[in-house]
Amino acid sequence: MQTGYAKLTTRWLSGGALALAGVLTAACASSGTSASGAYTPPTSATVVRNASWPGEPSGVHINVDLSERKLYLKSGDEVVRTYEIGVGQPGYPTPEGNYSVRRIVWNPPWTPPDAAWAADKEPQQPGAAANPMKVVKIYFNEPDYYIHGTGSIASLGGAVSHGCLRMAPSDAADLARYLMEHGGESRDAAWFQHVESSNETETVMLNTAIPMHVAP
């Protein structure tokens, strides 16, 4: 029997759309802290493929490789999970740099941004079929950039978004749950069952921010 977020993602894939939102704020790590509290690597840090870069945190963190179209969930040097993602189009690139995940919102509504490409779009309620946010939304650069589930699974592996990072809905839920567990805000099966069975928006603020590095 499936419970919690596993049932949530299964239900979405069979036709019931859920959504998630999240907000990212600043994080600290041993290699450095900015005046705003944001995680900063050594100034000499350069991107190294195979999911690693000099000065990365020793704890749980996220490395995104835009050229590989991969998101690496890591614990120290260990790659815990690897996910295929969709990234920003050339005209709407995903911002590179160092961020941190702090807020995660399940079942979010969608409000079209004040941008030309969204001029003909209508706001969408949580769970609406036309809501482009599926299952979960995890912010990494407020207020415009976030990781989210997508209904356009075929777009994964491409440069197709307006700057956000797209994931399969089940992957987005899996990532969000892991971040909650390791960010000091774990939930029990009943909580995920509630999320799965309703279209209520649930916002989670992580007690410990998760560092995130976005490489070109």
Image (cartoon, helix red, strand yellow):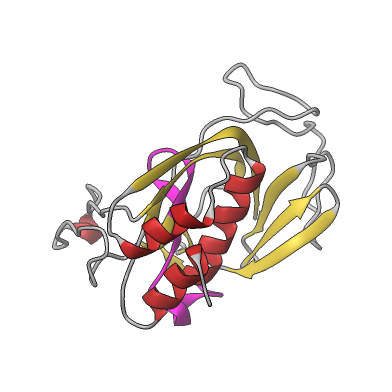
- Judge whether residue 48 is colored magenta: no
Quadrant (top left, top right, bottom left, bottom right) of the C terminus: bottom right
Nearest the eye: 114 or 77:
77
The number of numbered badges drawn on the structure is: 0
Residue shown at the point (25%, 49%) measured from the top left: 113
Expressed as whole percent of the image width and height from the top left, the position of residue 100 reads 59, 38
Residue 142 in the image, given as x and y percentages of width and height = 43, 38
Looking at the image, the residue that sits furthest to the top is 35
Residue found 74% across the figure and 30% down from its top: 29
Instruction: Tell whether 71 sits left or right of 116.
Output: right
Q: Is residue 7 visible to us here?
A: yes
Q: Where residue 71 sits: x, y (%)?
A: 64, 61
Give the magenta part as a residue range.
137-159
Closer-to-camera residue (124/166): 124
Q: Is residue 130 left or right of residue 122?
A: right
Residue 164 in view (yes/no): no
The quadrant in which residue 26 appears is: top right
Placement of 190 over or under 103, stated as above or below: below
Direction from residue 195 to residue 30 in the image, left or right: right
Residue at x 38%, y 74% (from the top left corner): 12
The residue closer to the viewer here, 140 or 96, is 140
How far across and down, in percent of the image, does residue 37 sit?
61, 22
Q: Is residue 15 above or below residue 102?
A: below
Res 50 quadrant in image: bottom right
Instruction: Please tell me whether residue 138 belongs to the stretch shown in magenta.
Output: yes
Q: Relative to the observer, which residue lies in front, 64 or 125?
A: 125
Q: Is residue 100 above or below residue 150?
A: above
